[in-house]
Image (cartoon, grey):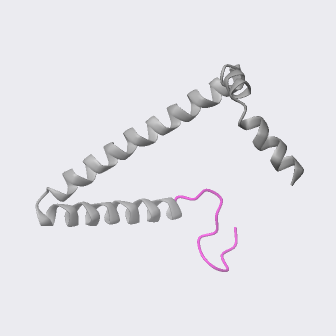
Amino acid sequence: MVFRRLLAALLHNPQLVERLSESRPIRRAAQLTAFALLQLQLRGHDAARRLRALADQPPGALRRRVVRFKDTFTEELRRGVRDRPGQQKGPGAKA
């Protein structure tokens, strides 16, 4: 309780807040925060643009892309399981 009041009193001191804002660690933290927020905003705009582009395609286009992705993923998964080095071929198989 006492610590909270002391901290509140310090943070309400304009001279202290100004001196802290001019310190290198606080400035750097503010720069990093601003950079992160800007990057998130840009990525959000980019994702929204891509979603709008997908929504503007003909109805069957998205379905074809999903089916093509599923087929490619399944084929790569089968190929990866088949080509595992040093693995047994099946249950009970001996090397």
Query: Which quadrant: the C terminus?
Result: bottom right
Residue closest to the eye, 36 or 6:
6
**Horizontal arrangement in the rendering, residue 38 relative to residue 91 (left or right):** left
Task: Tell me: 50 left or right of 38.
Answer: left
Residue 25 vertical position relative to residue 44 in the rendered view, above or below: above
Q: Position of residue 59 (x, y in %)?
A: 13, 66
Asked if the magenta segment contains residue 94, the reply would be yes
Q: Is residue 32 above or below residue 8?
A: above
User: Mostly what secondary structure, the magenta segment?
Assistant: loop
The residue nearer to you, when weighing 94 against 20, is 20
Q: Position of residue 82 (x, y in %)?
A: 50, 63
Identify which residue, 15 or 62, lies in the foreground. 15
In the rendered image, residue 65 lying in the magenta stretch gets the answer: no
The residue depicted at 46 percent of the width and 63 percent of the height is 77
Q: Residue at x 32, y 43 (%)?
A: 46
Q: Position of residue 70 (x, y in %)?
A: 34, 65
Q: Does 87 sit left or right of 52 as displayed?
A: right
Magenta stretch bounds:
83-95
Q: Is residue 13 left or right of residue 30?
A: right
42 or 82: nearer the viewer: 42
Answer with the quarter of the image where residue 51 lies: bottom left
Residue, x 38% and y 38% (percent of image)?
42
Expressed as whole percent of the image width and height from the top left, the position of residue 19 reads 71, 21
Give the quadrant of the N terminus.
bottom right
In this view, the residue farthest toward the bottom is 92
